[in-house]
Image: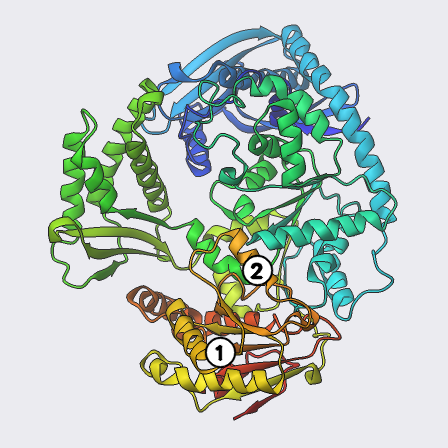
């Protein structure tokens, strides 16, 4: 047996018992943990060793890891844990896990250095006060060896099962065949380039049009690379639910077309979508699925491990059968599967589960980022924070006992931020230091309450506390790639209230470590041009490869008409309604069928749809509404039947402008009545200034590239396959400009009217 496991993973498997309990929170961030470890090491002697690499074996099971610190003069091994708050409130099973890790490291050290005994110390560092609490035991090597053997014995049966499965998986992957007789045009080029990228350890930006089968064309070569590149995990990351479904479908196609490769696939979803008891907190006294969670987890884990695909429904079925939380069962199974299909934030967010597990277990991973043009805006959102004074006002109306003075002080500092502000919006490149100091005082006081009476905290206070905590944490990331802005509005009795925002402009510095940590990251989309825009804003490594896949479509398949006599600029919008209605009606009468019409806003959409209904009532219409739920979105799409007739109205950049597959006669044309430029407002103007200063192309980076990208995405709904035919009408004078047309797909042929 040659199965290898990290010390942390071994102990999390063998030493966790009792309730799932998240009350000893919020825990320090990963960066706070790293800095805390450094501070502990800095206070030790010159001979103190840090990050000591260790490994050992038990019946062929290889256990590896890095001990936090060892003092050879004292013969003392330290396991350092950072925390916030009163240690006396730490759940027993948390402490038990920490001792397990420390003792395993201690045995590996005794074994490697021939020690008969050693002092084992848990060092708890409070990151707020810098206070260290040391809890020690002196253990003989024999005691530690017995403890190590026990943990390995508990893990061994699972490890042997995993080893057998992985051997079967590797054998299957080496003979894996493409699930179709041949690749589509462009699909082979994408697959071969991706395979070379992961083989050489490079990242890849791949622009490939809709219709070549990008999902299958990226997953297949990556699975073929698993064995030769010794990949531990493949992560397929998406921005939206339809992308996850496409990935799961592609994986099932691969499974069906091959001899069983024994692959294990997991779909991860957001906690609020997985939660079975949304009104309960995540601890045993509140949620029945948290009570005794770790006692029931082994059986649930074993049952889940028998399923090749753990999608949302399958995972929930297993969780219900074993009375465990499906969300946290999913987090556990992420350790034991080969492919994880999840949202971007599971790898790129500051507290990302998959990135954290990869680092802790030293996994060799490859990452696929679907519809990667979305990662710029999503990356900005992950590392931004907003804070509204209205929350504070509501809290001060009935202040929690003992917090009234601090809340008053915080409100005074908040008011001081905009005392001299005249305009509704104001941006700064500096942090509000005095405000943040008072905010830290508030956080400290609430933290004390959470430690003492965690079940008695008012929900409004808790919500405000978490907003404050997020704002404080993002403030630690603030640099030249951020804006601090204040937006004023009228509150009750016409008093001014301010919304504060720490707004990330360029997420490159924060995303780059995620890119570099993987063996390879492939970002793919139909719209990744110009490539320098995405390289700059996403922090791609310097040696990132670029691929532009030739489209499989012919110019004859899509009639592209540019209507330059109409302006959809805001000032001319009212005058544009009637001409747009006639353009839609004329095209519909010329070629009846299903069409999509895209507009810049719901208001504009409603004006045109209403006018069309009045002038041409014989044309069936249906329209996207703001805030549509999943059922309403499905109903909208169900109107696009084969050989159907009518016009669906939608917002450009919304739910129906990308990721929607209406093949054949379900959709024969689209009207795009906007260039798609983001709204000109103070925030976007600040982005333009900052991006111009850094890249010399402020307007292009802030407005033009994001706008035209949305147009091309929407246009991509029309031609989905080799046999499709359709029309695309681009309605705005600016579509005739060369700098806009140079961003169009190369296979388009267009005429200007």
Q: Quadrant of residue 606?
A: bottom left
Q: Is residue 534 above or below residue 60?
A: below
Image side of residue 313 versus residue 432, left or right: right
Residue 617 is labelled as 1
CA gap between label 1 and label 2 equals 40 Å
Residue 429 is labelled as none
Image spot of residue 576 (x, y percent): 39, 84
Label 1: element kind? loop
Residue at the image point whose x is 45% and y is 30% from the top: 37
Image spot of residue 408 (x, y percent): 14, 36
Q: Is residue 18 above or below residue 305?
A: above
Q: Is residue 489 above or below residue 753?
A: above
Question: Could one spot residue 235 in this view of the protein?
Answer: yes
Question: Could one spot residue 54 in this view of the protein?
Answer: no
Label 2: element kind? helix
Name the image colouring.
rainbow
Label 1 crowd (10 A; few <14 / some 14-19 / many >=20): few
Is label 1 in contact with label 2 (beta carbons under 8 Å)?
no
Say which of 159 and 364 sits in front.
159
- Looking at the rendering, in which quadrant would you find the N terminus? top right
Q: Quadrant of residue 746?
A: bottom right
Q: Earlier in the sequence, mark 1 or mark 2?
A: 2
Q: Nearer the viewer, mark 1 or mark 2?
A: 1
Residue at the image point whose x is 42% and y is 53% from the top: 381
Image spot of residue 140 (x, y percent): 61, 6
């Amino acid at each position: 047996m040659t199965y290898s496991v990290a010390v942390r993973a071994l102990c999390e498997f063998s030493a966790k018992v009792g309730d799932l309990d998240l009350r000893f929170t919020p825990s320090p961030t990963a960066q706070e943990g790293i800095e805390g470890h450094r501070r502990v090491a800095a206070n030790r002697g010159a001979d103190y060793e840090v990050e000591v690499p260790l490994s050992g074996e038990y019946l062929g099971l290889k256990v590896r890891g890095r001990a936090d610190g060892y003092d050879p003069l004292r013969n003392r091994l330290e396991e350092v844990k950072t925390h916030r708050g009163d240690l006396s409130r730490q759940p027993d099973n948390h402490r038990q896990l920490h001792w397990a890790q420390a003792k395993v490291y201690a045995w590996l050290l005794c074994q490697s250095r021939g020690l008969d005994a050693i002092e084992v110390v848990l060092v708890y560092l409070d990151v707020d006060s810098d206070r260290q609490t040391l809890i020690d035991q002196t253990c003989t090597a024999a005691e530690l060896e017995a403890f190590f053997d026990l943990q390995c014995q508990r893990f061994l049966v699972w490890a042997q099962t995993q080893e057998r499965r992985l051997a079967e998986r590797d054998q299957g992957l080496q003979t894996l065949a493409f699930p179709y007789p041949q690749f589509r045009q462009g699909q082979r080029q994408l697959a071969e380039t991706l395979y070379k990228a992961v083989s050489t350890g490079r990242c890849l930006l791949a622009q490939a049009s809709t219709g070549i089968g990008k999902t299958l064309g990226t997953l297949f070569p990556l699975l073929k690379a698993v064995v030769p590149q010794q990949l531990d995990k493949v992560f397929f990351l998406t921005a939206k639910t339809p992308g996850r479904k496409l990935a799961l479908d592609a994986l099932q196609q691969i499974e069906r077309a091959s001899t069983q490769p024994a692959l294990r696939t997991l779909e991860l979803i957001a906690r609020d979508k997985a939660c079975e008891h949304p009104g309960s907190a995540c601890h045993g006294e509140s949620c029945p699925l948290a009570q005794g969670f770790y006692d029931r987890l082994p059986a649930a884990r074993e049952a889940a491990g028998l399923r090749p695909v753990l999608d949302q429904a399958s995972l929930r079925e297993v969780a219900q059968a074993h009375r465990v939380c499906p969300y946290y069962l999913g987090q556990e199974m992420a350790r034991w599967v080969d492919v994880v299909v999840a949202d971007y934030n599971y790898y790129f967010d500051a507290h990302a589960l998959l990135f954290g597990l990869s680092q802790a277990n030293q996994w060799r991973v490859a990452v696929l980022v679907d519809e990667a043009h979305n990662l710029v805006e999503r990356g900005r959102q992950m590392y931004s924070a907003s804070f509204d004074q209205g929350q504070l006002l509501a809290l001060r109306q009935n202040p929690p006992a003992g917090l009234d003075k601090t809340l008053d002080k915080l409100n005074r500092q908040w008011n001081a931020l905009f005392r001299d502000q005249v305009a509704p919006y104001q941006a700064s490149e500096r942090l509000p230091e005095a405000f943040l100091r008072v905010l830290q005082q508030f956080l400290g006081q609430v933290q004390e309450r959470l430690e003492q009476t965690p079940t008695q905290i008012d929900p409004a206070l808790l919500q405000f506390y978490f907003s404050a905590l997020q704002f404080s944490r993002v403030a630690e990331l603030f640099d030249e790639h951020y804006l601090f802005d204040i937006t004023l509005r009228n509150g009750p009795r016409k008093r001014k209230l301010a919304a504060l925002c720490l707004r990330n402009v360029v997420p490159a510095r924060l995303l780059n470590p995620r890119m570099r940590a993987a063996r390879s990251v492939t970002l793919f989309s139909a719209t990744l041009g110009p490539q320098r825009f995405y390289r700059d804003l996403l922090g791609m490594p310097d040696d990132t490869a670029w691929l532009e896949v030739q489209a499989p479509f012919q110019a004859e398949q899509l009639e592209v008409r540019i209507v330059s006599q109409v302006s959809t600029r805001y000032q001319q919008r009212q005058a544009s309604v009637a001409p747009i209605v006639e353009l839609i009606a004329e095209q519909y009468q010329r070629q009846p069928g299903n069409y999509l019409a895209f507009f810049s806003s719901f208001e504009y959409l409603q004006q045109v749809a209403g006018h069309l209904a009045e002038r041409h009532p014989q044309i069936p219409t249906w329209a996207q509404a703001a805030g549509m739920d999943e059922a309403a979105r499905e109903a909208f799409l169900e109107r696009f039947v084969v050989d159907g007739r009518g016009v669906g109205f939608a917002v450009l950049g919304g739910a129906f402008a990308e990721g929607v597959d209406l093949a054949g006669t379900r959709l024969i044309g689209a009207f795009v009545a906007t260039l798609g430029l983001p709204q000109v407002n103070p925030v976007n103007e600040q982005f333009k200034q900052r991006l111009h200063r850094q890249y010399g192309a402020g307007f292009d980076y802030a407005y033009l590239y994001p706008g035209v990208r949305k147009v091309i995405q929407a246009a991509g709904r029309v031609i989905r396959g080799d046999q499709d035919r359709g029309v695309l009408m681009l309605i705005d004078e600016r579509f005739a400009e060369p700098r806009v047309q140079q961003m169009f797909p190369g296979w388009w042929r267009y005429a200007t009217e």
